[in-house]
Amino acid sequence: MPLPPVLFEDDALVAFDKPAGLLLAPDRRDKARENLADLVRAKMGAGVATVHRIDAEGSGVVLCAKTKPALDFLSGQFQSKTVGKTGHALTVGVPVMDTYTVDFVLKEDEAQPGRMCVVKKHGHASVTGFTVLEKYPQPAGRASFALVECRPVTGRTHQVRVHLAASGTPILGDPLYGDETQLMLSDLKRGYKGRADEHPLITRLALHAGGLTFTHPFTREKMTVTAPLPNDFAVALKYLRKFGPGPARRPA
């Protein structure tokens, strides 16, 4: 597998546009499964290392450092929560508020390893800000959807997914925290004739890490790296906008 598209590169760092489904690091159970860390080391050298994490099932910006000083400087920004992180999610259901913050305490679910859960104590604090950008209400009996901007302050495992699901609007296509809702063109377009061989408009976790803002390790200047919405995500939004009763956009 080739490396994902490069969004930015210089002597200090390289940022990739990771596709959905590609692991960041080797899988503990399946060592042969492709992952970004191994691809980067094989093609760019052992000294290049990922700086942070995003969900394997999601897509978006992944930042890698090319030198140890760059890695230390960038990692320090993530640890001190000074990196600006922006993502987009397509939710099943429309959040009650247009702008809100979730600050649940999270820990790994002992009954289901690999899955996180909300607890009252003995977990890790987590904070995400959300803004509803577009609403796609549907007729009675059909799921409604929303495009939500996500701004995680902390970086806990599955944080955005758990925060949205626990708030009552899980991310479309989330196998761990969502439901079986699918986004079908036939549910949006009247008179659709392709039901016999129809496939969902998006078949994976509808979560995209679209942007990172940080201080460059060498120049000390603020910079932002962005990744465009993947084609499947953009197509899903296109049809929601075209055939849905909305979109009802967030008031200015």
Image: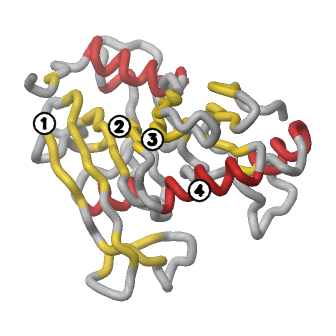
The answer to whether residue 198 is seen in the rendering is: no
Quadrant assignment, res 190: top left
> Is 211 placed left or right of 189 in the picture?
right
Q: Secondary structure at mark 3?
A: strand
Q: Earlier in the sequence, mark 3 or mark 1?
A: 1
Quadrant assignment, res 197: top right
Q: Earlier in the sequence, mark 2 or mark 4?
A: 4
Q: Secondary structure at mark 2?
A: strand
Please state the horizontal and vertical placement of residue 25, each as a whole percent of the image.
Answer: 73, 56
Label 4 CA crowd tier, 10 Å (few <14, some 14–19, many 20+): some
Please state the horizontal and vertical placement of residue 105, each as a whole percent of the image.
Answer: 32, 74
Q: Is residue 47 above or below residue 218?
A: below
Q: CA distance from mark 2 to mark 4?
A: 29 Å
- The residue labelled by disc 4 is 75
Which circle, 2 or 4, is nearer the viewer? 4
Please state the horizontal and vertical placement of residue 141, each as a whole percent of the image.
Answer: 18, 40
Disc sitting over residue 95 in the figure: none
Residue placed most toward the observer, 85 or 23? 85
Residue type marked 3:
Leu
Q: Earlier in the sequence, mark 2 or mark 3?
A: 2
Q: Secondary structure at mark 1?
A: loop
Disc sitting over residue 140 in the figure: 1
- The residue labelled by disc 3 is 207
Residue type marked 2:
Leu
The answer to whether residue 230 is seen in the rendering is: yes
Residue occupying the point 37% across, 61% down: 162
Residue occupying the point 19% across, 20% down: 247
- The residue labelled by disc 2 is 90
